[in-house]
Image (spheres, rainbow, N blue to C red):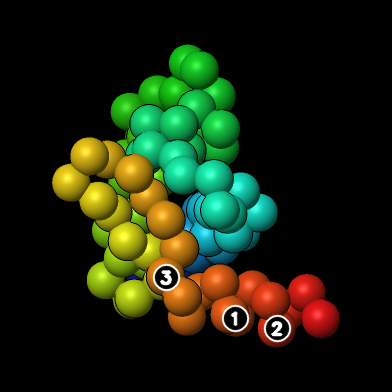
Amino acid sequence: MADEENLTNEAEDTRIEAALIQRVLDLHPTRVTGDELVRDLAGEDADFGARDGIERAIRELTGAGLLHRTDDGFVTPTRAAVHFGELLDS
């Protein structure tokens, strides 16, 4: 049962990461904060689980080299992420 739960959690994390990077690329070059992304993706009344999932996605995508998170809280795509997004759109 634990393996099934891990797969479900992993699939949900992947879904959130995909939605987040797509949204950041759609908004680029507009700069957005992590809080704005939470409201955008999970709504004004996002519960802890939704907020935490988006924060984890930001950390994972930053670690993978697809996002930058600035000291003032803004989240922006890296050049590599922007280029990849352009390739997908062509």
Dot 1 falls on a residue whose secondary structure is helix
* Furthest-left residue in this view: 71
Is there CB contact under 8 Å for labels 2 and 3?
no
Q: Residue at x 18, y 46 (%)?
A: 71
Amino acid at circle 1: Phe
Q: Position of residue 37 (x, y in %)?
A: 47, 38
Q: Earlier in the sequence, mark 2 or mark 3?
A: 3
Instruction: Check residue 87 in the rendering and tell me which mark sits there, or answer none.
Output: 2
Answer with the quarter of the image where residue 18 lies: bottom right
Q: Position of residue 87 (x, y in %)?
A: 70, 83
Q: Nearer the viewer, residue 9 or 86?
A: 86
Which residue is label 1 attached to? Answer: 84
Q: Nearer the viewer, residue 47 or 84?
A: 84
The alpha-carbon separation of the residues under discs 2 and 1 comes to: 5 Å
Q: Is residue 58 above or below residue 32?
A: below
Is there CB contact under 8 Å for labels 2 and 1?
yes
Q: Position of residue 32 (x, y in %)?
A: 45, 40
The alpha-carbon separation of the residues under discs 2 and 3 comes to: 14 Å
Which residue is label 3 attached to? Answer: 78
The alpha-carbon separation of the residues under discs 3 and 1 comes to: 10 Å
Quarter the C terminus occupies? bottom right
User: Is there any visible trace of residue 1 in the rendered image?
Assistant: no
Q: Residue at x 60, y 80 (%)?
A: 84
Answer with the quarter of the image where residue 61 lies: bottom left
Is there CB contact under 8 Å for labels 3 and 1?
no
Amino acid at circle 3: Thr
Q: Position of residue 43 (x, y in %)?
A: 55, 24
Dot 2 falls on a residue whose secondary structure is helix
